[in-house]
């Protein structure tokens, strides 16, 4: 199946649906990037899907490589920028100007394993922004981008690779490797069909335990 069609099929499902499917496939932590919250926009129904453009941030005095362009200019239409900031930093690594640029190029959103700022600016743009926490401090003399589109370890066996599918909504963020998208879609659809029957059973008065035992096998 074409990768673009797989992504369109995945858009029928929530992060919870997708995480449950990845657990069944024994993917580490069900692909759940725990600890990330949606700070923008305000609408509860917001959900983003897109392929990952990854950015590795380092402390300003690091001797690591430097990209030839500003990392915000590496975004792509239809993609989600995933940024990993060094742990323990007090400064933000994403702000309103960066969301303005991402929005202009057609980015679907940004997911920051670290801090962001300028929350109202992101909301004014209606641009989806997920992060671990916030700060009033800009990157300034604290952090800088080092590598673009490299594989980044979230924790233990869980990684975010360039091109992986990222999905974010009010419940959280999940990463889906390209190799598992078709299987995830199939499992999500199977579970959705069963859950419709369980909902109907519950609405008819059946007890939860009975409905699950009868219909979810």
Image: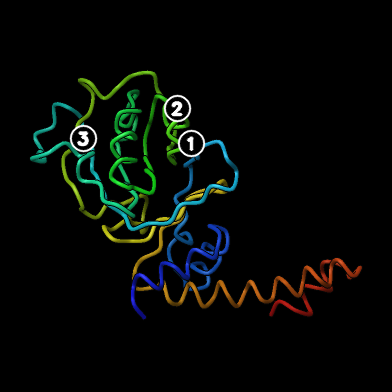
Residue at the location (81% across, 73% down)? Answer: 211
User: Taking 170 as reference, is 86 left or right?
Assistant: left
Q: Mark 3 sits on what residue? A: 58
Residue 194 location (% of width, % of height): 69, 76
Residue 204 location (% of width, % of height): 90, 70
- Disc number for residue 119: 2
Element type where label 2 sits in the image: helix
Q: Could you tell me which quadrant the C terminus lies in?
A: bottom right
Residue at the location (49% across, 63% down)? Answer: 11
Residue 138 or 118: which is nearer the viewer?
Answer: 118
Residue 15 location (% of width, % of height): 53, 57
Q: Mark 1 sits on what residue? A: 40
Q: Could you tell me which quadrant the N terminus lies in?
A: bottom left
Q: Earlier in the sequence, mark 3 or mark 2?
A: 3
Depth check, mark 1 against mark 3: the one in front is: 1
Q: CA distance from mark 2 to mark 1?
A: 7 Å
Residue at the location (89% across, 70% down)? Answer: 206
User: Taking 210 as reference, is 124 left or right?
Assistant: left
Residue at the location (8% across, 40% down)? Answer: 68
Q: CA distance from mark 1 to mark 3?
A: 25 Å
Depth check, mark 3 against mark 2: the one in front is: 2
Residue at the far right in the pictured view: 205
């Amino acid at each position: 199946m074409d990768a673009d069609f797989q992504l369109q099929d995945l858009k029928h499902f929530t992060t919870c649906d997708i995480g449950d499917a990845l657990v069944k496939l024994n993917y580490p932590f069900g692909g759940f990037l725990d600890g990330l919250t949606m700070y923008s926009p305000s609408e509860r129904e917001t959900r983003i899907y897109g392929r990952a453009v990854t950015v590795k941030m380092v402390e300003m005095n690091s001797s690591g490589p430097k990209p030839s362009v500003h990392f915000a200019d590496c975004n792509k239409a239809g993609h989600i920028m995933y940024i990993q900031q060094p742990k323990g930093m007090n400064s933000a690594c994403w702000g309103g100007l960066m969301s303005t640029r991402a929005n202009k190029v057609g980015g679907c959103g940004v997911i920051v394993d670290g801090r962001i700022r300028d929350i109202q600016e992101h909301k004014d743009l209606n641009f989806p922004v997920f992060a671990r926490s916030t700060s009033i401090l800009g990157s300034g003399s604290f952090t800088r981008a080092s590598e673009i589109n490299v594989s980044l370890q979230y924790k233990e066996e869980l990684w975010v690779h360039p091109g992986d599918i990222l999905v974010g909504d009010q419940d959280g963020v999940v990463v889906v490797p390209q190799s598992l998208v078709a299987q995830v879609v199939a499992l999500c659809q199977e579970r959705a069909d069963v859950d419709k029957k369980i909902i109907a059973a519950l609405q008819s008065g059946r007890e939860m335990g009975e409905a699950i035992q009868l219909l979810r096998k």
